[in-house]
Image (cartoon, rainbow, N blue to C red):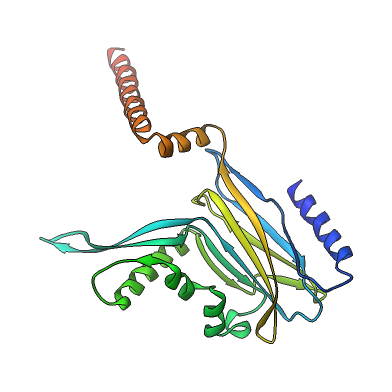
Amino acid sequence: MRMLGAILGMTMLAAAGGAGAELVTDVSDDRVSVTYRYEGEELLLFGSLPEGAEGVLIEVRGPEEAQNVSRKGKVAGLWMNVESQRFEGVPGFYALLSDATLEGELDKQQRAELGVGPEALFRQARWERDGQEVAAEEYFQGLLDHMRRVGLFQERPGSVAVREGRLFRAAVDLPAQTPVGEYEIVARALKDGEVTHREVQRLSVAKVGIEKWLYNLAHDHPATYGILAVLVALFAGWFVGMVTRGEAEH
C-alpha cells in the first residue's frame, strides 16, 4: 500500500510538473511507527525538479542528541576508557544523497556555506575539551565512523535517480537503531554549482504500544522505571529458579 501511494504520488508530480518553475517533493510515509518488532524501514523520497536544474541534493536530519566518544588505553595492563569527549547538537541520524558525486556538484566551500556534510556537522556541534581542536576532530571522526557502521550516518553520492531530466527518486534506509523524534528532509535543486530551489519535508519517528509506554515512563518517571525494572528482574529470577528446581525434583 505504501509503495502504491508513492507511485501515485510520482504520477501526480509528473502531471503537475508542467509549469516546471518549482521544486516539488514528497515522501512515501511521513510517520514511522516503532514497535518491539521494528527492524528498520526503507523510505522513498521522490519529486520533480524545476526546468533547467542540473542536479539534486537531499539531506535527512534526525533529532539532535548528546554523544559521548571514548578512547581506550592500557592502564596497569588492562584496556579501559582513558579519555572521553562529549558532543552536543549532533543529529542522531544523518543522510546526504545526491544524483552525482558531491565533489562534482558542490565544492568544500559551498558545502560549508550550506551547512551539509561531516565538516559542517562538526562545526555545528557543541563540545568542550582541554586541548587542541584537532583532537576534538579525531573524536568526532570516530563518532561518525561508529554511526556509519550502524547505518545512522550515510553519504551516498549517485543514489538519487533522475528520469527525463525532471523526476527524481531516492531511497533512505532507516536502521533498527533509528532514534525517535522529528526529522527534517531538505531537497535542493542545483544549477552551475548553486542552489536554485529548496523544499523541506517533515518526518516523525515515534514509538507505539508498549514501547511508547516504556519510553515515556523512562524519560518522564525514571525512578519508577528503575523500580519496575528491578521488580521485573527479581520476578524473572524467581520464576527461572522455580522452573529449574521443579525439573531437578523430577
Q: Provide residue 194's location: percent of width, then percent of height.
A: 66, 83
Question: Is 228 on the left-hand or right-hand side of 154?
Answer: left
Question: Is 175 on the left-hand or right-hand side of 244?
Answer: right
Q: Provide residue 154's location: percent of width, then percent of height.
A: 53, 66
Q: Provide residue 100's location: percent of width, then percent of height.
A: 65, 78
Which quadrant holds residue 33?
A: top right
Which quadrant holds residue 10?
A: bottom right
Please state, as top left, top right, bottom left or bottom right, where the N terminus lies in the image. top right
Q: How many marks?
A: 0
Please state, as top left, top right, bottom left or bottom right, where the C terminus lies in the image. top left
Choose between 235 and 202: the one closer to the eye: 202
Q: Provide residue 224's location: percent of width, then percent of height.
A: 36, 29
Question: Is 178 on the left-hand or right-hand side of 162?
Answer: left
Instruction: Farthest residue to the bottom: give it.
Output: 192
- Residue 137, compared with residue 9, is above or below; it is below
Question: Is 61 on the left-hand or right-hand side of 52?
Answer: left
Q: Which residue is depicted at the point 83% across and 62% down?
A: 13
Choose between 197 and 118: the one closer to the eye: 197
Instruction: Farthest residue to the left: give it.
Output: 76
Instruction: Farthest residue to the top: give it.
Output: 250
Q: Which residue is depicted at the point 72% across and 54% down?
A: 28
Which quadrant holds residue 187?
A: bottom right
